[in-house]
Image (spheres, rainbow, N blue to C red):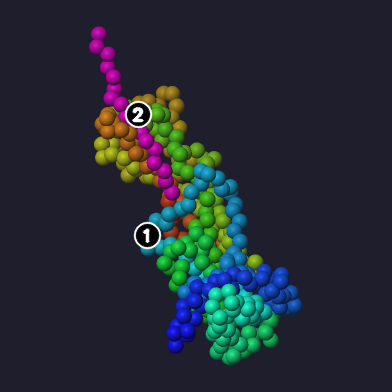
Amino acid sequence: MLRSVVLRAVAASALAVAVAAVPSPATAGGGRGGGEKGSYEGSGKGSADGRVIRAETKVRLTTNGRSRSSTTGTLTSSNVDWTPPACWYEPSFSPKEIETVVKLWRNIDGFVLPGVGDFVGDMLDHRYKDGHPYEDYNLDKQGEGMFWAAVKNPKRKDDPEANSCDKQPFWVDEGKPPNEPLAVSPKVLAEYAYDELPVPGTEIEMAPAGRSTVNLPTWIWLDKATFKKTSVTASLPGTGLSATTTAEPVSLHIEPGTADAQTYPASGDCTINDDGSIGEPYAQGKAAKTPPCGVSYLRATGSDGAYPLQATVTWKISWTSTNGEGGGLPDGTFGTTQDVTVQEIQSVNR
């Protein structure tokens, strides 16, 4: 009895070693028959935690409209109750690859504890070989479908929800949609791409620059060349599944960093112009005018230091897919904070 308990405890942690050792598709027999009846190959790689065999995602990402750089950031959903998916299921292992996983377990004895390989191998064989529910690893169906496995969103692998995909790999016939709500789909791909949208840092232009003056408006604007549409396409090779998620800037919100200030407009929301810019650059002769986007500070910063002015851009998010599906996703926001020093107007006594 004690040996059985120890074996079960070791099996959960050691399973990762065996699955990670599965050869790549080129050496493990590939996906749909390793090229016999189809072209899609399984991941051939995986890991295990919680005694669930998982795979590495094969989803590929393509960025359009903006290159990633040190100044780009990641959007935050304006809907606090929504986040991109932390996990999903996708086609990952061919019958030959599942068979390889089990055989690797048979050979692990001696590296951990004597008997642990056979013990876990028997568990896997019970599911994938002995008819509970699969027989002989579905080798007779090689090339006619795939075992779908749980994968984690690489950017959210530490989220508690990443473990909600807790099913062992299950079989899906080629061309038949899986009966699983968390199975990869165009919408799942679109939501995954949401996390990858590269948006520019909100480095606003201000006039006067560096130091504002009490009761005099500070003009704020953003250049049209910086804030333009950006999109990311997520696709799963060999399946025809693809979705493109697009972010379009729609407004800039100003938080002065103090209650002793007035924003323009009063709401602090500066809408985007027809040419894609936000606000209006300051120019000579506009000192007496009210800026379409800006702020007036009513009190100097003094010894308290600078005011932390926060500028946040709201992005409208939409998606399309290769099968005609599409729609909207929650707006995204991304902002930065800039320190603003405010001085009193100096008068000269003669």
Tell me which corner region of the image, top left, top right, bottom left or bottom right, holds residue 163: bottom left
- Report the residue at 54% width, 78% height from top: 113
| Tag 1 secondary structure | loop
* Image quadrant occupied by the C terminus: top left
* Image quadrant occupied by the N terminus: bottom left
Residue 250 in view in this figure? yes
| Residue identifier under label 1 | 80
- Report the residue at 27% width, 29% height from top: 302
- Report the residue at 50% width, 59% height from top: 155
Q: Nearer the viewer, residue 272 or 50?
A: 50
| Residue identifier under label 2 | 212
- 183 left or right, relative to 36: left
- Image x and y of residue 62, in percent: 61, 56
Label 1, residues with CA under 10 Å away: few <14, some 14-19, many ≥20: few
Region in magenta = 334-350
The amino acid type of the residue labelled 1 equals Val
- Image x and y of residue 182, in percent: 49, 73
User: Outermost residue toward the bottom?
Assistant: 131
- Report the residue at 51% width, 43% height from top: 71
The amino acid type of the residue labelled 2 equals Ser
| Tag 2 secondary structure | strand
- 296 left or right, relative to 239: left
Residue 217 in view in this figure? no
**Magenta-span inclusion, residue 213:** no
- 152 left or right, relative to 343: right
